[in-house]
Amino acid sequence: MTFEVAPTDPRDRLDKLVVKLLERAGQGASRAEVQRWIEHGRVLVDGVPGRVAGKIAAGARVAIEPEPPAATTALPDASVVFRVVHEDPHLIVVDKPAGLVVHPARGHATGTLVNGLLARGGFDRAPIDPRDPAGHLRPGIVHRIDKGTSGLLVVAKDARTREALKTLFAKHAIEREYWAIVVGHAKDATISTLYGRHRSERLRFTSLTDSGKVAITHVRVVEALGAATLVSCRLETGRTHQIRVHLTERGGTPILGDPLYGKMPQDPTLRAAGAALGRQALHARVLGFVHPATKKPVRWESPLPDDLARCLAALRKRLSR
C-alpha cells in the first residue's frame, strides 16, 4: 500500500503516521506491530527504509508492506465450557464461568477460554500486541477477567476489530459494571487513586502508592445484608485487580471469598458462605460499547450465576429470621 503524506498527517514519528494511514485505509494495526514492520524494512519513505522515530515531510510517499502475524501456538479444545451471549463476524461476547482461566499462561497451558474459542473457529490468530512475548497465546483478547471472577467478556475475531476495541478501552468508552458481595458496611463512593504493583508482594497490586497509573471505581450500594453488602462497581479504568484492591484498601470492605486481598470474616454465617463459594464473590454483570463495525450501541447483562445466587439467598435468609 502506498500513500502520499498530507500536511495535516502526524509527521513527527513514522510509526504514528503509518497507524493513521492504515486507519484511513480501513486497516487495523497496533503501533507496536507497525514498529516491527519498520524495523524489518517493510516501510519505505520515498523508496528508502524508514526509521521508527523518523520525521516525515509533507508530500513524501510511504509504501507499507504488512508483515504476516505469528500464529498462536494455543491449541483448540472443544471440551472447554462457556456460554456464548452474542456472536457476529467481528466479535464474540461470552459469559465466563468462575474457575476458567482466560488465556494460556504459566501453569495454565491448556483448558482456557482461548483454547475453547479456537475450537469454534473463525478467529484471527494474530498476537494482540507484539510487545508482549506471550501475545500469540491469546488471539483476540482485549481485556481479562480473573480466574475466580465470572461474567461478560468480549473477544475480537479479527485484527481490525481488535484494534478498535483496544481504542475504546483506552478511551474509557466501554460500559462495565460488576456486582460484588463484600464483607462489612459499604457506602456509595467514587474511588480515585494512583495504582501499581505492590512493592514487596509481586502477585498483588495496591492503591496505597504515590506513583503509578490512575484508577477510578464508582461504587454503589445495591442491598444491605447485615454484616455484608451487595454493591455495584462501575469501572472508569480497568487496572488488574482494580475492584478487589479498591474495595479492600479504600472501602474497608474486602470481597467475600477473595483469596488474595480478603481475610476470614468473624461472622460465622459469612465464613460459611465464603467457604461454600470457594472464590471471590465478583461478577461482571454489564458490558456495553459502540460496535466497531456497525457503529451502533450494544449492551448485554448477565444474571448472577448459581453459586453467587445461593450465597446471596443464604445471607438474605439470615436477615429474615
Image: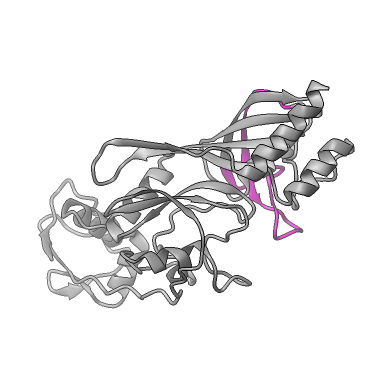
Q: Can residue 73 be seen here? A: yes
Q: Residue at x 63, y 41 (%)?
A: 243
Vertical relation: 309 (above or below) 112: above
Q: How far across and down, in percent of the image, does residue 123 sit?
A: 33, 64
25 within the magenta span: no
The image quadrant where one finds the C terminus is: top right
Q: How many marks?
A: 0
Q: How far across and down, in percent of the image, does residue 112 sit?
A: 53, 65
Q: Is residue 242 left or right of residue 138?
A: right
Looking at the image, which is closer to me, 280 or 80? 80
Q: Is residue 226 left or right of residue 299?
A: right
Q: Is residue 64 left or right of residue 124?
A: left
Q: How far across and down, in percent of the image, does residue 135 sit?
A: 45, 68
189 within the magenta span: yes
Q: Residue at x 46, y 74 (%)?
A: 74
Looking at the image, which is closer to me, 3 or 169? 169
The image quadrant where one finds the N terminus is: bottom left
Q: Residue at x 29, y 72 (%)?
A: 37
| Way the structure is coloured | one colour
Q: Is residue 235 left or right of residue 44?
A: right
Looking at the image, which is closer to me, 268 or 294? 268
Q: How far across and down, in percent of the image, does residue 154 sit?
A: 42, 50
Residue extent of the magenta highlight: 186-214
Q: Can residue 247 be seen here? A: no
Looking at the image, which is closer to me, 78 or 288? 78
